[in-house]
Amino acid sequence: MPLEPHSLLPVAYRAALQVVRSPVLAEEASERAIHQLTVACLEGSPPDSPKAWIRTVARRSACAILRSEWARTRGMDLEDVASAPRTAGGRPAAQSCWVREHLAPALTPRQQEAFAAAISCNTTRAAARRCGMEPRDFRRSLTSISRRARRLLERSPLPADAALPGAEPGMPA
């Protein structure tokens, strides 16, 4: 019976989760291990004991992720957090619409689909499923979309906030 690498994904995930204790990092490590198993099978040298082999490779991948920048978060001073302006939740709807309108033409059709899924779904996994991507590929697509959005904002600043009706300067309250 031929070996199906993706059938061993749960085994790899559990092994990686024992090392990293983070579902996202364990998922990445297990996907890396499955990739290495696929490559080994394609090269004509499948392991004698696939489950043991995938557990070892998943643990090693998890350790490599912990050593890399993937698992590191930078600490922030609490004063910086308190004084930082709110951006995502505090941005007026008009500015969000402006970014969406101007960003859409700069995206590929696949990225437009991923962008729409990211806005409409509650989780990354659900959004990835909606546009038919693996979560890892979806996250990479979102990184690319974010880069394009930042470049768009650098080239042309957001429009100024419009005054609320009845709150125009010079009008009595």
Image (cartoon, rainbow, N blue to C red):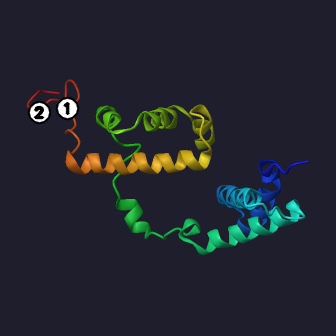
**Residue found at the far top of this picture:** 165
The residue that label 2 is drawn on is 169
Give the numbered dot on residue 94.
none
Q: Position of residue 172 (x, y in %)?
A: 12, 27
Residue at the image position 21 percent from the left and 24 percent from the top: 165
Q: In terms of sequence position, does the residue under pointer 1 or pointer 2 come before the other?
A: 1
**Quadrant placement of the C terminus:** top left
Label 1 residue SS: loop
Q: Position of residue 129 (x, y in %)?
A: 62, 36
Q: Nearer the viewer, residue 153 or 165?
A: 153
Give neighbour class at mark 2: few <14, some 14-19, many 20+ (Cα, 10 Å): few
Image coords of residue 53 (percent x, y)? 83, 66
The residue that disc 1 covers is 163
Up-down relation of residue 86 to residue 100 (above or below): below
Q: Nearer the viewer, residue 82 or 125?
A: 125
Q: Is residue 29 above or below residue 127?
A: below
Task: Give the residue displayed 77% in from the left and 58% down from the top.
Answer: 41
Quarter-of-image position of residue 134: top right
